[in-house]
Amino acid sequence: MAAPGPPGPDADTRLAALGAELADAVARALPQWAADAVAGVLGAWRASGAAGSAGVETAVVVDRVRRAAAEAAAGIGDELRAALAADVDRQRTTPLAVVRGAVAVPTAALAEAGVPPVVRDRFAEARFPEDPYGLTPASLASLSAEVGELALAWGAAKAAAHRARHRPG
């Protein structure tokens, strides 16, 4: 992993390299993150003894979501790569905002399996209405340690690139 260095003429190059690295790491991590998220919700549902929960084969659903997430990861990686390749002054979204779109894959798998929505607090319901299972990652580190570290490095590189460009004098 490249580390951000002092601000300078190559700050934009460093930022772009870390952005590409971050997008690749996100694409690699998404299938396992989605599988783990689904397995967690299915496990809790089954442990509750709720009607219908015993009839769902967790391994089948998890395998299905892992495959679907692998397909979706390529598109999310491309979207993230494009967003992070934009000029530092024209980046209008964050990596986390792009990644949060990945919630659709495990959400669809859980809904298809007949899992009822989970109880969420009012903030989560209002902020993430498309996430009835409470899967929305709070940070990129939720995907993997590698993604979390790269996200921090990218954020520091973005700050350095912005500062290098907009430093008075």
Image (cartoon, rainbow, N blue to C red):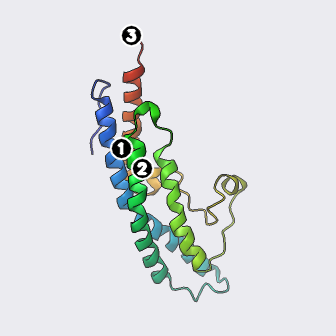
The residue identified by callout 1 is 19
Left or right for 12, reference 112? left
The residue identified by callout 3 is 169
Residue type at the position of mark 2: Leu
Q: Nearer the viewer, residue 145 or 73?
A: 73
The circle drawn on residue 80 is: 2
Residue 119: image location, x then y, percent: 69, 66
**How crowded is the residue under tag 2: few (<14 C-alpha within 10 Å), some, or many (20+)?**
many
Residue occupying image coordinates x 27% and y 45%: 1
Residue 121: image location, x then y, percent: 70, 57
Residue 125: image location, x then y, percent: 69, 57
- How far apart are the alpha carbons under marks 3 and 1? 28 Å
- How far apart are the alpha carbons under marks 2 and 3? 33 Å
Dot 1 lies on which element? helix
Residue occupying image coordinates x 50% and y 39%: 92
Q: Is residue 11 above or below residue 58?
A: above
Picture quadrant where residue 66 is located? bottom left
Dot 3 lies on which element? loop
Residue occupying image coordinates x 35% and y 43%: 19
